Image (cartoon, rainbow, N blue to C red):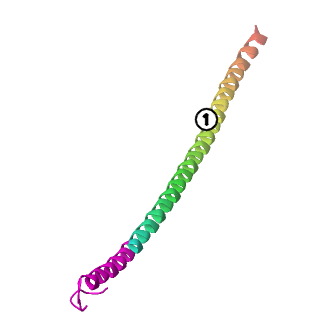
Amino acid sequence: MLSLAAATLTDAAAAQGVLATQFITLQSVVNTALGSLGAEARALELQTAFLEEITDATEEGLGNIVDADMARESARLTALQVRQQLGVQVLGIANQAPQILLGLFQ
């Protein structure tokens, strides 16, 4: 960047030339900074989208795990209920046997 103090100004045209040069230089610096900010903003948007996708996939995976656990526990409960019903039937049959024997003695 040129400094007004370092430049030798002989007339208004020279001052205008120095100011124009400084303006172009500063404009270039601002454009570079804006480009850098834009690139960083885009990178943040991409990172945010990626993290949202990972969050969604994680939630879906956890949901599948919970569903699998629920299905396993449901099958376990059904098996226990069948065992209970079979136990009741066995006890009923076992209780009938003495009645049959008593019927033979009558």
Q: Is residue 96 above or below residue 16?
A: above
Q: Which residue is mark 1?
A: 77
SS of the residue under disc 1: helix
Q: Residue 18's quadrant in the figure? A: bottom left
Binning the other alpha carbons within 10 Å of mark 1 as few (below 14), some (14 to 19) or many (20 upward) gives: few
- Could you say where residue 9 lies in the image, as x and y percent from the top left? 23, 89
Which quarter of the rendering shows the C terminus?
top right
Give, as a three-letter code, the residue at label 1.
Leu
Which residue is located at x 36 percent, y 80 percent? 25
Tell me if 77 is positioned left or right of 16 in this view.
right
Most extreme residue toward the right, as rendered?
104
Q: How many marks?
A: 1
Which residue is located at x 75 percent, y 15 percent? 100
The boundaries of the magenta stretch are: 1-30
Most extreme residue toward the top, as rendered?
106
- Could you say where residue 77 lies in the image, as x and y percent from the top left? 61, 35
Q: Nearer the viewer, residue 62 or 100?
A: 62
Chief SS of the magenta region: helix
Instruction: Based on the picture, tell me whether residue 22 belongs to the magenta stretch.
Output: yes
Q: Is residue 93 above or below residue 27?
A: above
Q: Is residue 88 above or below residue 70?
A: above
Tell me if 54 is positioned left or right of 82 in this view.
left
Q: Nearer the viewer, residue 23 or 105?
A: 23
Q: Nearer the viewer, residue 101 or 78?
A: 78
Q: Is residue 51 above or below residue 25?
A: above
